[in-house]
Image (cartoon, coloured by chain):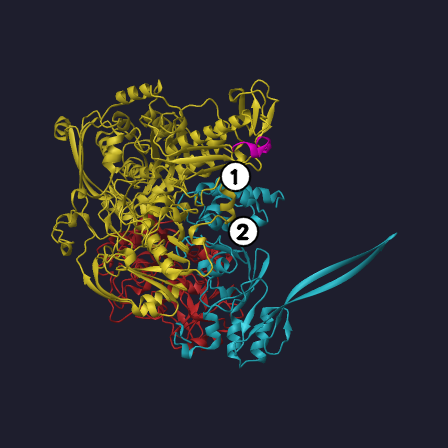
Chain colours: A yellow, B red, C cyan
Amino acid sequence: MPEQPYHTREEFNYVGKAGLKRKDGLEKAAGTALFTRDVYLPGMLIAKTFESPYAHAKIVSMDTSKAEAYPGVHAVLRYDDPELAYEFEYPSWGWSAQYQHPLNQIAHWAGCPMGFAIAAVDEQTVDEAMKLVEIEWEILPFELDYEQSAKDDVILEAHRDIDTNIRSAEGVIEHELGDVEKGMQEADNIVKFTYIDEEDTWGGVEALSCIAVWRGDHLDIWVHNQTPNPAQMRLAGYHQWVPVGYFVRVAPPVNQYTLANKIHVHSLYQGAQFGGPNWNTWYCNYPLTAAWLAKRAQKPVKHILDRSHFENRGYDEAVHYMEVGFKNDGTITALKSLDYGSTIDFPFKVGKGTGVPNYYDTVIVPYVNKGPKSCYRHGMKECGGLNLPYSIVAGELGMPMTEVALKNDGCYGNSMEWINENVKAQYGWTRDSLKEVIEAGKEAIGWDEKWHLPGEKKLDNGRYHGIGLAFSHNWEVDPNTYFQPNQACVAIQRTEGSVKLIARHSDGGWTGETSYCQIVADELGAKYDDVEIRPFDDVKFELKQGMGSCGLICSSVFLVEAARNCKKKLLEICTEPTGPGGRQIFPGLTPDDLEVKDSVVFEKANPDNKKTFYEVCQADWQFHDPAIGWAANRRHGMEIWNLLRQATFMEVEVDTETGEVIIKKVVNVNDVGKCVTPESVKGQQYGGSYMGIGNSRNEEVLYDTQTGFQINDNLIDYKWFSFNDIEGPMEQIIIETGMGYGAYGMSGCSEVVGALMATSTSDAIFNATGKRVTHFPTTPDRVLKALGKI
Amino acid sequence: MKLHKFNHVNPKSVDEAVSILGRNGGKACVNAGGTDMVGVLRLKILPEYPDVVVNLKSISPSMNYIEEDGNVLKIGALTLLDDIANNEIVKEKYTALAQAAHKTASPHIRVMGTIAGNLCQHNRCWYYWKKDNIFNCARKDTTGLCYATAGQNKFHSVFGAAAGCLAFHPSDMAPALVALNADVVTSKRTIPIDEFFTVKVSPSGAGSTVLESDEVVTEIQVPQPASGVKSAFVKFALRKSIDFPVANAAAAIGGEEARICMGAVAPNPRRATGAEDSIRGQSINESNADAAAAEAVRNAMGLAHNRWKIQIARAMVKRAILGCA
Amino acid sequence: MPHERNKDPKNISRRQFLRDAGIVVGGTAVGSAFILTACGEEKEITKTVTKTDTVTTTAPGTTVTQTATETATKYVCPVCNEEFDSLDELKNHFESEHPDDKEIKDELDRVVTYTVNGHQYVLQVDPQETLHDVLREKCGYLSLKDMCTGWGACGSCTVIVEGKPILGCMALAREFDGANMETSEGLAQKKHPLIDTYVKHYTMQCGYCTPGFIVTSKALLDMNPNPTVEDIRDKLAGNLCRCGTYPQHIPAVQEAAEILQQGGE
């Protein structure tokens, strides 16, 4: 069994306990928690970037002289200014064909920020000055539909001598396992179906902004980004290239850029980032614009965007032409899919989460004139490729989805037997996560009493009752995949023995401040109330929140190690000679003789021999080192498979006159390995459910095909779920199998909760009506269409 | 997004307000609750940005009241929707009105928004509402296009265009007032509700009612329904709160009376006279409600993306009728 | 007057020039307001008067003298220096006694008073400023957020005005002269039970929508001290939360209601 130093712990005072006071609760309740837009600096200018009126067009010439002369304008930055000489377009990460550039000469989507930016005394002055810029355009053809673009009927980038819309090797992505043709031959039945994911957008609640001010050649910049270091690197002249985390220097140091050690990035509370514009998307571009405008103006600049800048989309917009082959006992023998668009269903869900031994998936991602894709809560419908085939098989055979799920569970085509052997090898024991999850969920929702054959239960109120399920693995399965470099530091403050924690974390999720402090309190032996984390301020070195998607899994081991190092240092301080006189705080004892609990160091054999942290700090404090523990920047190489599962059970009523799907009950069951903060985990479960239901039932980006503009780029017409859109109760069940690869065996939770809502709803609609909706979101018109009413 | 500059007046009387409006010749606009007008201003959706905004809330005596005067319910133009929703007399005798008020928008908007403001609000077409007047459309400019015709028209009119415009009338109060046969009293005249709504091309945004540029609504008068007449209002929206209707319907039925009005399915609130004829005088049941609802949408014409609205409208008419049973 | 500022320096008035240049600051502080007269001179229209009362009480063997000091703001006419107890009275006086001085009337129209979280503010606001702008940028109450950037769709800018939870982004500042307002900072300052119950029930995640929800809940409890679950759902239906905290608002509001009913502050 591989060594797992962070994996087990005998007892917990705080980890796993409910009822602890939320660390950031008071400032958020009082409304005094600071977000990026709340930064106001004296003399601050407002800046905006011009938005393209065309979906695809090139600036041929641009006259900004009148704008530059307009009273109240302090700086104008143009696409051809020297600050941008080293910038170039680079494509988004992976499954997205859009280009990124701080101030592009070419607009790739309607409303795209490009061309020029203006900083002036107020917003009205910026708006008026923008109107004075004269641009000569070359209008280019545009396309919004992936499948249409893939046909290459109109070559969209012919003006750049590119002869296809499928841009190089990145435009065609294939995933393969086994022999899919053979698998189809072994099947008793084959069903073909089409599954469509419409586009949705990121979660953020605060419209993006960035404040930059130069003090000499030092740049202070407040970025709306939960991992500020990519922004820092961009400002130092690096591009973040694929794969994630690998930076390429594209500009010489100094010159118009500046060195990383003079860039002080501040990252305040984020406001529901959920990934989103966190990454290499153009988010990292507009801090550059803010910084250069501020440098030109020699005044603070606040660069603002508004709600219409919804461009950062989720990684799930595609048409999937799928085929599933299965035996009469529910075993799936093969899965095949041809996808046009952006989707990660197969690599991240099907592959990692099933025992299906044969599949072949081709994803074609042509260039289209839409905003860039990015990770945010990893695509809210991405489990379609996994759950829809299961649901279809279940429906065809008259079986409940629960049975088909269990029959086909596995990993990379391997069966449950393989999983169990693997787990036993890792831990010495094994548990069947999916089975436990499904059993707990079935009981909570009353599955056995309520399940019926599709379309068979009409209620007195005229609606049809349905019950459904979707499941998936937790975010990451492969050993060691997402153990990103990370850092943490735990320091006991000399003044009164309070404990300060320095670490980076994501704003939402259960990677929050509370969880971090619980772990540190337990490992160090401090009182929870004595531990604080305050991650906003620039701490002058790189802090990464390991992986957006599995924050706590990755961060936890660093917190554990940092806290243990701090404790080790503390006990050394207590027992080593101090100062010229050679006095010891605990005379005659060694570190092994001591223990720490409730912020008190005491002798194990004689607990009355004790000193509080404060007393330790005060004892000859100038003669010994501070108690600081640090853990940084290495992958610790734990080769553990993360085979935990989660499921969402849903009970609905379908109004067949209107196509409305009324949600009567939601049960989330998540195997999180080890729960740190129960309230936070549950918050992810119901919170992810609300977001996921919004994404899967109501949210879709709609375009005007005549101009290419998103036509519903506001929160009236783009429909996040409101309070009463889930009518019934929600129940959260936490399972702790301890099989994750985070500290104490923890795993992630929230990434996929939302993604299960779409397919659990679809499964429930099928159970209610006998009709399947595989076009998401399942808006009333699509339900009506499936019912044959329109 | 900050508002661009304008002048602002807090008039003390209706006469003063009307006088300012008259003096500014269409370049002034009124502000009641603010929940529509401020958005129009902030997003700069109109070709003509007003010079002056005239606050109606400063007028004294206040136009915020609900009182019964004999057989007529008199509601001041600036009465809050929340007050209408909670008023016991309205709930009991003018039920559709209370239900409509309660279903409008969100709780916050209901304690700001007024009955007259709700009737006079701008249409809710997303082309019309795109910021900075990116779509200078047929409703704002006689040379403009109706982009919804060939564009994304998922929520637009299923009963054709008016003055070349396919936008839908988004009010929830309007169908209820039409069903209850209300009158709109202005600073100049009294207008039956059936004649209040129109569609005209207007660069200053006054294209939803027959009001002249120097005319303000002062009161809504609702005749008490005859004995035996019940009223009901229903609404369908994608969300349970905040949203404008996909389709709504109000009905006032009893004895030989039947007035049914559909909203959000046409440029103006639409009387469903076919449905009225079908249900009038009958004892309401599922079957005849369904038949009447079918009549209501008989002449509906779906566009490329909105045929589903016909189905929804039909369901709403049916449920509004059943609400009067 | 056209809404766009006249950018030709030759046609700009001294007053406009001084204001555009940001030279005149007056009015951002609580309790004082300056206006510009026609010749560009600053004249303060507020005056703080202090009244001191001395009270002597006698008990057997002792004499105690206590001094009570009251301060009040008086509003001073910039033309005739007459003093008034309220801004409204000053404005009415000006309209009737000095009807021809349009420029000073415009200046006076810029002045509003609010009571926010128990503190009186005398402010100068432009016509296009909303309560959201003014409360944040002039009074420092940053709890009013901007989730939907001004579409009136989210409730994150909610402020209690005369007991009602309204959207600050849709409220023109000049239309609320004299109003009594509350924000979540005020609730925290006076330790309203909702603050603690929100923290206790983890009724926040990213925190952005939280102040909007809290003041909406407070307004609900003021109107309805014993709300049912349906009442809570009904009144909070206009607040959007992307993190999905919705279920937790119910126990937080219910517990705060209990505490208030038991006489807790």
- What residue sits right under mark 1 in the picture? C200
* Camera-side residue of B107 and A508: A508
Please, what secondary structure does the residue beneath circle 1 have? helix
**What is the magenta range?**
A614-625
In percent of the image, x 27 and y 62: which residue is there?
A: B166
Q: Position of residue A569 (x, y in %)?
A: 49, 28
Horizontal side of residue A781 vs C2, given as left or right: left
Inspect this view and state whether residue A157 appears.
yes
Residue type highlighted by circle 2: Glu
Q: Where is residue A499 in the image (x, y as percent from the top left)?
A: 52, 35
Q: Where is residue C13 in the image (x, y as percent from the top left)?
A: 46, 77
Prevailing SS of the magenta stretch: helix
- Upstream in sequence: badge 2 or badge 1: 2
* Camera-side residue of B312 and A216: A216
Q: Position of residue A687 (x, y in %)?
A: 40, 40
Please determine whether, in this image, residue A493 is positioned above or below residue A284.
above
- What residue sits right under mark 2 in the picture? C185
Please determine whether, in this image, residue A732 is positioned above or below residue C116.
above
User: Residue reaching furthest front?
Assistant: A580
